[in-house]
């Protein structure tokens, strides 16, 4: 009787173990198929980028004609871009009027104010004006952004700094609506 009982337990154990093993193998095969699909998609994306670093039509359409490489957040003539050092240096060299908005992704004031910033830049029509959203103490900030905050004495998020000819003409820690942006940016 004990032998029959042990054989039954062994049979159940075998079914459970081998059944799980087969399920695991099937799951691994499905993951491998998904991984292969992702690899194929990535290969297709690389191929669309063109050979030898040539820019595709799609990439060219996405690029800003003014030569700035940062992501355009708002504006067509007056651009509001995600900050990058190369674009900032280019704007300084070109003697652009510059708005620096020190933004933290965790800041409710920053998140509430960004639609106002976007609306103002979408309305502005000054090719000599450019804005940068500079990450500030939110884990996305890099060394260049930290140095910029230190250079202008920014002590907390949603601070706006306006530059003309590379010189600070305004530093404002208060919250602005679209109208205030327009007033401040038009008069520089």
Image (cartoon, rainbow, N blue to C red):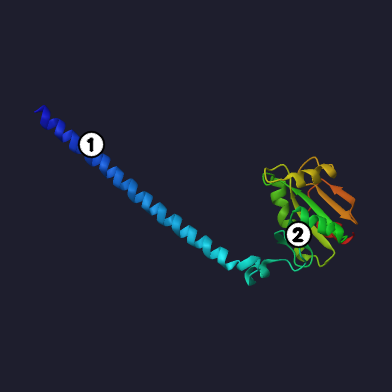
Q: Secondary structure at mark 2?
A: strand
Front one among 136 and 180: 136
Q: Residue furthest top?
A: 2
Q: Nearer the viewer, mark 2 or mark 1?
A: 1
Residue 13: assigned label: 1
Q: Residue furthest left?
A: 1
Marks 2 and 1 sit apart, C-alpha to C-alpha, by: 65 Å
The quadrant holding residue 132 is: bottom right
Q: Is residue 172 left or right of residue 137?
A: right
The quadrant holding residue 92 is: bottom right
- In the rendered image, the quadrant that contains the N terminus is top left
Above-or-below relation of 109 to 180: above
Q: Residue furthest bottom?
A: 57
Question: Local crowd at mark 2 within 10 Å, few (<14), some, or many (≥20)?
Answer: many
Q: Which residue is mark 2?
A: 80
Question: Local crowd at mark 1 within 10 Å, few (<14), some, or many (≥20)?
Answer: few
Q: Is residue 62 left or right of residue 19?
A: right
Visible residue check, residue 180: no
């Amino acid at each position: 009787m004990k032998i029959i009982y042990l054989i039954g337990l062994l049979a159940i154990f075998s079914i459970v173990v081998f059944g799980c093993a087969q399920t695991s193998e099937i799951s691994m095969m499905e993951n491998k198929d998904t991984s292969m699909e992702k690899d194929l998609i990535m290969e297709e994306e690389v191929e669309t980028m063109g050979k030898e670093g040539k820019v595709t039509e799609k990439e060219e359409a996405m690029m800003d004609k003014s030569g700035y490489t940062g992501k355009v957040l708002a504006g067509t003539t007056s651009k509001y871009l995600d900050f990058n050092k190369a674009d900032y240096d280019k704007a300084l060299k070109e003697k652009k009027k510059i708005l620096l908005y020190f933004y933290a992704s965790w800041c409710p004031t920053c998140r509430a104010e960004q639609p106002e910033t976007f609306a103002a830049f979408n309305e502005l029509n000054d090719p000599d004006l450019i804005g940068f959203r500079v990450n500030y103490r939110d884990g996305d900030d890099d060394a260049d952004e930290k140095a910029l905050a230190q250079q202008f004495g920014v002590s907390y998020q949603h601070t706006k700094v306006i530059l003309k000819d590379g010189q600070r003409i305004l530093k404002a820690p208060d919250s602005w609506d679209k109208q205030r942006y327009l007033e401040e940016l038009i008069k520089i």
